[in-house]
């Protein structure tokens, strides 16, 4: 009987602690105020002058929509912190006492931080302004006179797989560029349109040939023939490939424009 009473006592204490943490978080999130500017550590002490945790905005000074902003939780006792925003923002990267948030829309937000024990809490009200920066576009057209090289490859672990590595002959800006393809029938023959060359918003410096990789066949058959159709620089190239056992043979009549580096595997 005593042991049962002790178990109930422990359970009641645990439930009470959970409720206290929930109430604390609820107070932080209720009635989100209309912020005037980002608050920093100027109000980071209570009425008795005791230091309390607070959040600072590290970078940038002005928050713009669709641009990353970095927040840091200062004065907490635990390195593990739960971050969130009100209204909710899903583009949030948690790095412990630091969080990087990319607000998708302009507006008023509250950024909240709670340590892993729920004992240290803080919030910061911020104004997110509409972005004045246009997203850079690094799309590039295929250069006149360029060629496309196709290199077939297989997987030694399976006889059913056929991949095609593609690469241009000429170089394009951004060392992280890649070929933009329209590929309507993946895994069923090879039917591809090369639309151009693209790169990420943060173009890596340098120039390189543009590449891509596609799967041209993954069919559980010993013998079959499939068509090839490549559209490159407003011209259509046609051929076929045949699988016999573990071997592939390509029928391709072109020596320029779109070229196979090997016709047998």
Image: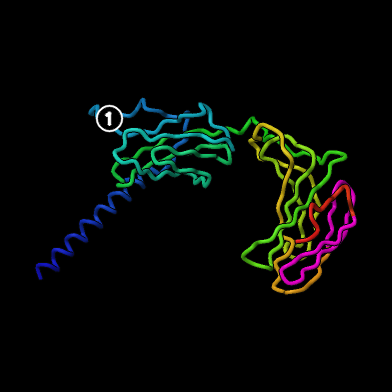
- Is residue 186 rendered to the left or right of residue 107? right
- The span picked out in magenta is 228-253
Q: What x and y, as percent, mark residue 257? A: 87, 47
- Name the residue rendered at 27%, 50% in the picture: 20
- Is residue 158 rendered to the left or right of residue 92? right
Compared with 159, 29 (above or below) is above
In which image quadrant can residue 135 be found? Answer: top right
* Closer to us: 138 or 14: 138
Compared with 213, 189 (above or below) is below
Can you say which quadrant of the picture contains the N terminus? Answer: bottom left
Q: What x and y, as percent, mark residue 162? A: 71, 62
- Is residue 44 rendered to the left or right of residue 132? left
- Name the residue rendered at 65%, 61% in the picture: 155
- Name the residue rendered at 90%, 57% in the picture: 253
- Is residue 132 rendered to the left or right of residue 86? right
Dominant secondary structure of the residues highlighted in magenta in the image: strand
């Amino acid at each position: 009987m005593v042991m049962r009473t002790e178990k109930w006592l422990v359970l009641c204490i645990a439930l009470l602690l959970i409720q206290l943490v929930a109430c604390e978080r609820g107070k932080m999130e209720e009635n989100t105020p209309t912020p005037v500017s980002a608050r920093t550590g100027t109000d980071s002490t209570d009425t008795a002058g005791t230091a309390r945790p607070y959040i600072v905005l590290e970078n940038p000074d002005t928050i713009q929509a669709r641009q990353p902003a970095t927040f840091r939780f200062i004065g907490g006792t635990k390195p593990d912190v739960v971050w969130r925003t009100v209204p909710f923002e899903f583009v949030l990267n948690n790095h412990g006492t630091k969080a990087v948030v990319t607000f998708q829309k302009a507006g008023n937000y509250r950024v909240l931080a709670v340590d892993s024990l729920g004992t240290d809490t803080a919030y910061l009200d911020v104004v997110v302004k509409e972005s004045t920066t246009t997203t850079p576009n690094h799309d590039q057209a295929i250069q006149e006179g360029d060629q496309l090289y196709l290199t077939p490859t297989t997987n030694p672990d399976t006889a059913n797989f056929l991949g095609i590595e593609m690469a241009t002959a000429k170089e394009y800006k951004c060392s992280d560029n890649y070929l933009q393809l329209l590929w309507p029938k993946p895994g069923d023959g090879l039917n591809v349109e090369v639309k151009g060359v693209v790169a990420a918003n943060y173009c890596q410096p340098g120039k390189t040939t543009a590449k891509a990789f596609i799967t041209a066949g993954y069919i559980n058959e010993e013998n079959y023939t499939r068509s090839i159709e490549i559209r490159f620089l407003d011209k259509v190239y046609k051929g076929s490939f045949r699988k016999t056992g573990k071997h592939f043979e390509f029928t391709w009549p072109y020596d320029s424009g779109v070229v196979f580096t090997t016709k047998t595997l």
